[in-house]
Amino acid sequence: MKVAFWSNARGKSCVTSNLACISVLSALRNPEERTIVFENHQNVINLGSTFFNQNPENVVKEPNRYTVDMGLGKILTMIERGEDFLTGNLYSFMEDYLGKRLFYIPMETARNPDYMEYQLDRMCIRVLNYLEHYGDMVLVDTSSAPLSSSRKILQQSDMVVVNLNQNSQTLAHFFRNYSSVKEKAFYLIGNYDENSELTKGAITREYGIPGNKIATIPHNIKFSDAVSAGRLIPFLLKNYRCERWDENYGFIAAAREAEELFRNQLQIFSEIGVGK
């Protein structure tokens, strides 16, 4: 299954941290599955920087094999040339976490971003279909900038996780202008503040969103610090089964509910073939 994480509001809807959180929680709840994640744009804060700090004290990660021959650019080039990957060899171009349950395809910052977009624009559909053979889920952090590859990824995905924020103007802009996305959308409100007038309930009523198609990842400073410091995996591992009296319980409960709703909706879309 192919899933695009996307927002109409650039830099305001926590797309990267939401995807990172959902992917780790999904890997923890479904240890028999493999999830592949990547982004179609360069950014200082990327999925890899949230998952893993290069100097952590405790993190479940396989030995790092990062070289110039690793990453999305290498995979694009090999597929473009029609080169075959040996069984399991594709994973050598990725960073792996959680006992090879979660795989991240890094985008080399040394590569020209315009050339990378040129390659992705030409080949993203082939790459998505190829990666789908290697992972149970392929999750893409899709740029909100008007990139041709973003448009194709959104069209090709089985589900689009629309990352909303509690801002009336950006909400109205999405529901007014992106009717084509709504058919296969699951909504995720990141950095959620329950004290805002724009609660999940208010947004659901205003825009007619079914309750099983929207979830929240609450504001939590410990989560935010973990994301910025590259400690997301240790943070979620430590708190995954925390008790009700723990300060992070509310956050973890909501995030785990978001992951469960996400998976349930993806299964529904898979059965009815919405994204096909």
Image (cartoon, rainbow, N blue to C red):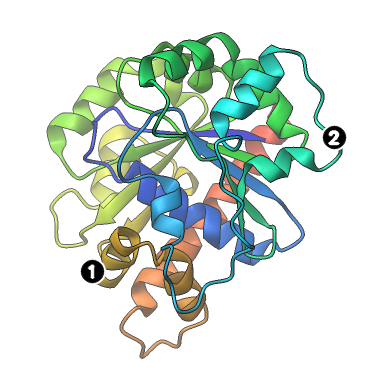
- Residue at (47%, 43%) from the top-left corner? 213
Disc 2 designates what residue?
86
Quadrant in the picture for residue 128: top right
Check disc 1 and report its element: helix, strand or loop.
Answer: helix
Q: Which corner quadrant holds the C terminus?
A: top right
| Disc on res. 5 | none
Q: Is 251 above or below relative to 213?
A: below
Q: Is 92 above or below relative to 147?
A: below
Check disc 2 and report its element: helix, strand or loop.
Answer: loop
Disc 1 designates what residue?
221
Q: Is 242 above or below relative to 240?
A: below
Of badges 2 and 1, nearer the viewer stands 2
Depth order, front residue of 127/241: 127
Q: Residues within 10 Å of mark 1 (few under 14, many from 20)?
A: few
What residue type is disc 1 on?
A: Ile
Question: Does residue 81 show up?
Answer: yes
Q: Residues within 10 Å of mark 2 (few under 14, many from 20)?
A: few
Q: Which residue, as the protein is rendered here, is positioned at the far bottom?
A: 245
Depth order, front residue of 137/227: 227
Report x, y in % for residue 62: 64, 63
Report x, y in % for residue 95: 59, 50
Q: Which residue, as the protein is rendered here, is positioned at the far right?
A: 87
Sequence order check, earlier mark of 2 and 1? 2
Quadrant in the picture for residue 98: bottom right
- Residue at (65%, 23%) from the top-left corner? 127
Report x, y in % for residue 267: 67, 42
